[in-house]
Each structure stands twice: as C-alpha cells, then as structure tokens.
Image (cartoon, grey):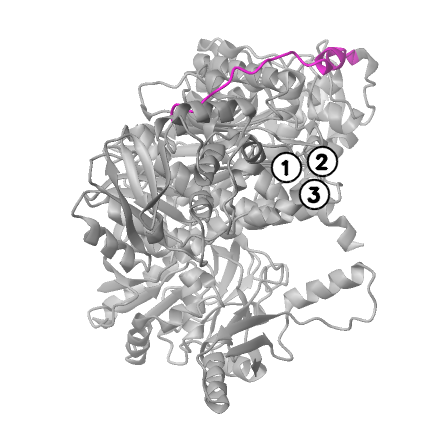
Amino acid sequence: MKFGVVVFPGSNCDHDTYYVLKEVYKLDVDYIWHKQTTLSSYDCIILPGGFSYGDYLRSGAIARFSPVMQAVINFAHQGRLVLGICNGFQVLMEAGLLPGAMLRNKTLKFICQDVHIRVEDKQTPFTTLCREGEVLRLPIAHKDGNYFADAKMMKELKKNHQIIFRYCTPEGTLTEEANLNGSLDYVAGICNRERNVLGLMPHPERYAESILGNEDGKRIFDSIITYLSKEK
Amino acid sequence: MKAKVFVTFKEGVLDPQGKTIKNAIVSLGYEGVEDVRQGKYFEMTLDTLPKEKAENLIKEIAEKILANPIIEQFQYHIE
Amino acid sequence: MKVPEVNLKTALEQGLTEDEYQRILELLGRVPTFTELGIFALMWSEHCSYKSSRALLKQFPTTGERVIQGPGENAGVVDIGDGLAVVFKIESHNHPSFIEPYQGAATGVGGILRDVFTMGARPIASLDSLRFGSFDHPKTRWLVEGVVAGIGDYGNCVGVPTVGGEIYFHPSYNGNILVNAFTLGIAPKNRIFLGRAKGVGNPVIYVGSKTGRDGIHGAGLLASAEFDETSEEKRPTVQVGDPFMEKLLLEACLELMQTGYLVGIQDMGAAGLSSSSFEMAGRGGAGIVMELSRVPCREPGMTPYELMLSESQERMLLIANKGAEEKVRRIFEKWDLEAVVIGEVTDDGMVTVLNDGNVAAKLPAKPLSISAPFYHRPMRKPGYLKDIAQFEPASVPIPSDMNQVLKSLLSSPNIASKEWVYRQYDYTVRDNTVLIPGSDAAVIRIKGTTKALGLTVDGNSRYCYLHPLRGAMLVAAEAARNLSCCGATPLALTDCLNFGNPEKPEIMWQFDQCIKGMSQACRVLGIPVVSGNVSFYNETFGSPIFPTPTVGMVGLIDDCRKHCDQWFKEEKDIILLLGDTRDELGGSEYLSVVHKLERGDPPALDLSLEKGVQETCREMIGRGMARSAHDCSEGGLAVALAECCFHPRRSFGASVELKSSSIREDALLFGESQSRILVSVPRQRMKQTERLLDKSSIPWAAIGSVGGEALRVVYGGEVLLDYPIRELHHLWSKALERLLFSKEDE
C-alpha cells in the first residue's frame, strides 16, 4: 500500500500529511513533485492543503495546470483513490474532478477554528469505518471555503449521495452558526460520482495524534487504509 | 496591443465582498447605489495580432484560466 | 538621472548629522560619491547601526550553558538537546505598519521569518505583540483590521503557525502603533549558518525576488525619525510582501543548506543589498566585490544608488563555495527562483560596488557595520514620574458592586478574549500545536523527540511608564511565569525595545532603566538574552509612546505529555493560590478601566519568591498534580479565576473563600500582586500536593473548588462576587468584536 503526497509550489500541509502517514501509521509514502507525470506505483494520491502558487488568481486555479495534474486526472479515471484536503480540494474542483467552486468565507476573513462535521454517507473508501451521522471534530484553516454549486449541480450531488460531510453542531445538528464559512447546504466535503475522489475543507491530518488533543482525523485515514487492504 | 479583461461573479452567485462594500458605501451616507459587484481586472500586453486572432486568444485564456466558469463571467476590450 | 552633488547639505538631507559627515570625510580622505553617501546614511541610521542603544545593550546577560549564538547575528540560537537547536528573534515593524497596516505587518512577518531561516532553521511557530491606540480612536479599527489580516495572510500562506501573542490598546499608541513579530525555528545544532563572508574567491550570489524601487530609504528614514504630517506621504516607501515567493525562498534555502555548498547567508532586509553585503563582509573580516549590472531588476534604468538602497522583499545574499555555482543555481531553479552570481569575496576588507565595471562605491566594511559609530546619549529622569508617584489609594472609592466591576474588566479591550484576532491566524499548521492560543503560553511539540516548547510574548507598558526599572523586571518575570504555567522551564529570551526619541534625555533614561530592570530579572531567573531589536522614534508630534519593552521567551518541556493549560477541567477539583496577595492597586488595569487612573507604583516584585513560585508550579505540573495553572496578571485574582472557568468548549463555575485580612476588597479581587499562580488539583492528589507545598518555602492557600454555575468569591464571610459563569464567558468572548465593530451593528 503506497501513498503519494503531491507538492505544489506553495503547498504547506504536505509535511503534515506525510508525517501522519509515515510516522503515525508507519506506511509507505512519497512526496510527489508537481512536475512528476507518472503515478502508477501509488494506491492513493493526496493533494495537501496550503497556498499553491500563493492562491493567486483563485485558490487552486494555477496548480491545476501543473504537469502532475494530468496524471492525477488519469489516476482518478482508473478508479484509484484521490483525496484533496483544503487547498487540495480547491485544486480538484478547478481541475474538474469534483463539482463546484469555493467563494470567500461569509465572514470575509480567514478562519482557523475547530469545527464539527457530520458523516453523511459511509459508502466511500474514505468513510468506510465511519457511522452515518457520526460527528468528527476537525480544524479548518481557510479563507475560501464557502462551497458553491448551481442548482442543477446541487441536485445531482444530492441525488447521487455525493455530499459526504456537512458542518454541524457538536451534537450533529445542521445550523447556520456551525456553518462558519457559509457553505451552501452546509457542505464540508464531497466525492465524485464514482466515489473514488473526495475533497474536504477540514484537516484530518492535524488531528491524528492524542498529543494534539484529538484523533478524529484518524477515522478518515483508517477508512482509507482498511479499504485499500481489503482491495489488495 | 493591450487587452483588458474584467472578471465578475455571475448573476445569482453571492458576492460577499461586493455586499460588504455596498454596505460601507451606504453607511458613509451615499445614496443611489443599488448594488456593488466586485471583480478582477487584468491588463495584458500582446504581440501585435489581427483583431480576430487577438480576440480568440483572449477568450480562450479567460475561459481556461482567468475566470472559473462555475462562478464567474468575463468581458474584454482589445485596444 | 542627474546625480546630486555631495556636500554637507545633501548629507543632512539623507539624515546624517554634521559630525557624522565630518567623520565620513576623515574616514575616506575624500568626498564620498552620492551612492556612498546613501550607503553611509542608511548603515549609520539608528535602525541599522543601533548607535544610541549599542553601549547600553551590553548590560544584558547574554551567555548560558545552552546558548550557541547570542545577540549580533540574524537570530539567537539555543541548544535544546537531541542534537537540535532553537533559533528565534523578535523584531519590530512599527512605522511601516502605522502608514500601511496590511503590508507593514505582512512584511514584518516576512522579515522575521527570513531572519530565522537564514540561520538554517525551519520556522515552526510565530507570535506577535501588538499595541494599538485607544479602541475608540477613529483610526484604530482600520489599523487593527489591516495588521491582523497582514500577519495572517503572510504567515498562513507561508505555512508557519501563529500560535500566540498579545494585543493591548492604549491612547499613547494613537499616533504610533507597535507591531512586534516573533518567530522560532528549529535546526540541527551542528548546522547553523551565519551571515559571514569568508573564503577569497567564493561567489556572492543573489537569490529571490527582483529588485524594484520599493522602500528606497524605507527603514532608514521611517524608523529613524519621529512621525509628523509628512509621514502619510511616505506611503510609497512601504514595501509589498509576497508570501508565496517567501515560501519558495524558504524551501530552496533549506534545501541548499543540506548540501555542503553554502558558506554564509544573509537576508536583504532593511537597507537591502547594502546591509547584507557590508554586514557579511564586516563580520567575516573579508571584503566583497560586486557588479550591479548583474542584479536582477524589476524596473529598467535603476541607478546604483537605488539598487544599493532598495528594500524589495524576499531577497537573500549568499556566499557559496567556489565551483558550486551551478549546483546552487539548479536548486533555486527547481523552486522557480533566480540565483545570480553578482560578485566574489575578497581579502581587502572593502565592499567594492561596480556598475558596468565602473566603481560606484568602494568603502571599508567594518566602519559601516560592526564598528559603526555609537553614542552615549544624555539621560535625565523624566519630570512626570514625580507627579504620578503621588497616589493615595485611600482617595479611590471602593466600588459597592464587584460583579459590575468584574463585568467591565472582562469586557474591556485589554482583558477581553482575543479569539477574534487569533482565529484569523492558522495556528495548527505543521501539526505541532499542543496548546492553542488563549492560555498563558503556547506549547508546540518537537517532532522526533519527547520534548515540547513553551512560547510567550509579553509586555506591560503601563508598569514601564510608571516605573521603568521595576516595570521591565515585571515583564521578564511574567513571561517566565507564563511559561512555568504551561510546565516549561524558561531557556532564553529575545527582546524588542520600543521607545520614543533617543535624542531626548528622558527617553534615554527610560531606556536605560528598562534594560537594567530586565537584566536584573534575567540574572536572578537565569534567563539569558540571545537576540533582540531596538525601535526608537516611536513618537508622533513630539508625544512618545509609553516605554514598551516586549519579550519573547522560550521554555522547554522535557516530556511533552506533561504540559498544562489554564482551564479548569473537573468539578470538585481544589483551587490553590500560590504566592501572596498584597494591598496593591498602583498601575493596575482596574485602576485604569474603572477609575481612569494611571498612577502609583506598579506591584512589588520579590525575585526569589517569583523563582520559588515558578519552580513549585512546574514541579506540580511535572508530577501530574496540577490539572490547570494560570498566572494572575491584568485584572488580578478575580479575572484570573474567571479565565480559568472559560474552558473553550464549556464553562466551569468556581467557589472561592478568602480569609479576612486588612486588604481592601478591590485590591484583593483586582490588584495585580505578582508571583501568583492559580492551580487546580484533583481532590485525591491533595495530600501529596500539600506535602510538596509545605516543603517549598512559598506561601500558598487552598482557596476553593471548581463547580457550580457561578463564579462566587466570599471574603471574610461576605459575598463579594456571585455571577452566572456562562454570562461572564459570553461577555468576555464577544467584547473585542463588539468594541471594534459596534458602529457597524447599529
């Protein structure tokens, strides 16, 4: 089982993601420089958080033209796992692997805070071990996390159960106060129709060790690992 | 030659910055401003090209990278 | 462009004095060129040369067992064991931030990050100490929003967490805010890089952003003169930051440092190409020759004067081993950066600046760097001290409703929660943040070890205004106490000394007193000063800021699991107060907020008691007796108790009973007696805790227990405070936002 963490110029959660996979899980993991064009030896590619290309123009807009992205698209089309966290999620949307776009947070400001997200669907490789309705506490750290999709897209997302995480209260209720960035329909994470590409704004890699106060992020990594080991 | 490209949010997409700017204008006491939409403005210096070729080039660039068609639209002038 | 003639008049225009111009003529034995004059003016400016402060700064204790590098380099370096060292410094960016808060604060963060990674350390945490004018001053809101966004956008983008800080409002900063940025990095202790030019023939390489006309004479002029009505016009000299470029530069430099190609490296910060070349040559005892036509330029037609003085951001000058040029270039190319050889190291002790082969400047390195002139400026005790020392506590009425007093303090800008600020900072990136902002100090773990670091920045300018010597002692003692409250043993500190115009004897006296006070506290507490920064001329229209020495202090926790925060965690836990409460009101936040008085002596400090309290607190944490620990500072015991109750995810009540004494009620609740720490202890650990406390020589008392829905304080049988904790929590959480933005809500 081998993971790849893509490094764009300006990625800054690449080290964190790598650290969790390598040191917490003791897994085989490589950094993948954004100019690399073959990904055949990997089972799961992670696009980490950060400010690829400074987030200049729009978050993720320039990174999606990096050479590695064509390989990521092919990799996804082969049905293999791609996870986008925060900026990685934005890149996946700009690249057309996930539907929708991000607007500026409703507060207009960067928000760094713990949020609660509710697992809406366990039928993905990223949530196999979760219960539906389970609430995870994870940190967000972004300025553009206000999810938007037009009515038609939204209808599709719902019909195909592509909304995987929604912002909620600690008890699991959907409220506007819990939806800090103002996302449409409380969307915190979605997958593609084929369910092998997932993007989410909160950072599971930041809460994967007890010393950091919370291990809820492990629910997602554990799910991926379980899925991949069954697949093998 | 120069191309000027304006990128704005599409109708119906919430523009929180535009809204905030509008509120600020109103709170400063100015009347008659109905709505504000914030956008991006790009100035591009081009090689000298036939007008039609330049237009096609700008359109392609705007569609591909300057604007995100899910939320944004664009206009351009070529001088 | 016509080059102006060089004479006394042009020298004065550049900010040099008549004496200094004479010195230049003597030193060179000729009239300098215009470019040379510009370099002198910049390098001999207060900002670059520390000419008013250098002699006095020698009073600081700067050595210690763990100190690898003390003051004088880009940052201080301290050994933390396991083959690792921490590299840290605090630096001011006050004047640029007042003129253009967003870019000023952003480039302040950029500068301090570069100071740390030039030494070979990866930055892993930043903190900020901020001072704004009165919260109802018309400019304050704009300044706060700009500074906070600037710090956030820059640090967030580079991916260095901003894990803590402090922010205070006071009218003395109405015309001159303070933005002090602290960064800490971590490096292998045997691979620290210094800003030194060595090895004749080694290439001098320029890396990073291209040079533009931004900030020409920025730091020199802005930070070396008072503010007046022309300051607004200086806006174009404020540099624009590019955090993305910084991130690339950071990664490329750290990659280069893992090779053996690098000899020396220095950030082109204030005074750009001039300071980096002269300082590296000066410190290395070498010379440098460089060709300006090779410098990558953003704008055409830049003159040697402009190139030498530009303060374009995100640039570095480095010295590599001869023959490694191509390898260095390839590393930078990977990160889409330019690396251009612009010159080489020589042995003549001169910095020779060529422009298309013609000599534009040729000056000795040392007199412009390490042996620049310095002054013993006159000092005089300020007259105001006589007046403000006259303070009769008896003339201050004791309020009848202490609940009301507590509420006004909790919702006052200096005590209210700063969450509105720190939630705009990414404080969890890099996956190390064990203790998030909001407690006494931040705690970050060190990957690959069992260790963690405690980090804090502290200042109290009112204390320093009322009694500069004691005030500065109190600042150092509180910083150490904050670290002790999270379980960290203080290692070393970095200071940022923000003062008014040093040409005024009263300001110099304040400055000297503060250094003496801080040095005294550092000696007793065993905390060396390893780096720092002086910011003078913090005045507008002749009115100085309160003297504001701020310290950034770093502490070590050997076992990361044994850290502590300030919040109560279990009902029925016993609340202990370590230290002694005295009948003290002078200089308190209470006196200022409730009685509008800034008078009297700040609280007394007994450094040996302070040391004992801190050691005991750390021992309680280390042995797992303390479930929480919190220092009593602004707002005294009552505010500290309330803060212990405000757990980020729920509120706890507390019930406290204090023995009757001669201390007046307001001093008891809100006085700021020092060396006090509130600790909560599980009931079943009390016996053991008592034994430990009785063995120590410090005064202590069990004063109550955690629980209930209210914060309740009884004094000699009389209920002084009794108020629902949730309401207090809400009030305190939302106060800052309400104060700053209330007009918008209406």
> Given the image, what chain letter belongs to the residue carrying mark 2?
C
| Residue C77 at x, y percent in the picture | 34, 30
Q: Name the residue tied to disc 3.
A: C140
Q: Nearer the viewer, residue C608 or A65?
A: A65
In the displayed structure, does residue C536 sit left or right of residue C281?
A: right
Other residues around mark 2 within 10 Å, as few (<14) / some (14–19) / many (≥20): many
Q: Which mark is residue C177?
A: 1
**Circles 1 and 2 on the same chain:** yes
Residue drawn at x 45%, y 89% as measured from the top left: B53
The residue stretch that appears in magenta: C370-393
Quadrant in which the C terminus of chain C is drawn:
bottom right
Q: Name the residue tied to disc 2.
A: C412
Q: Kindly check if marks 3 and 2 are in contact, taking CB atoms under 8 A apart as contact.
A: no
Q: Which mark is residue A205?
A: none
Q: Nearer the viewer, residue C96 or C407?
A: C96
Q: Kindly check if marks 1 and 3 are in contact, taking CB atoms under 8 A apart as contact.
A: no
How many numbered markers are drawn?
Answer: 3
| Residue C685 at x, y percent in the picture | 46, 24
Residue drawn at x 41%, y 59% as measured from the top left: A49
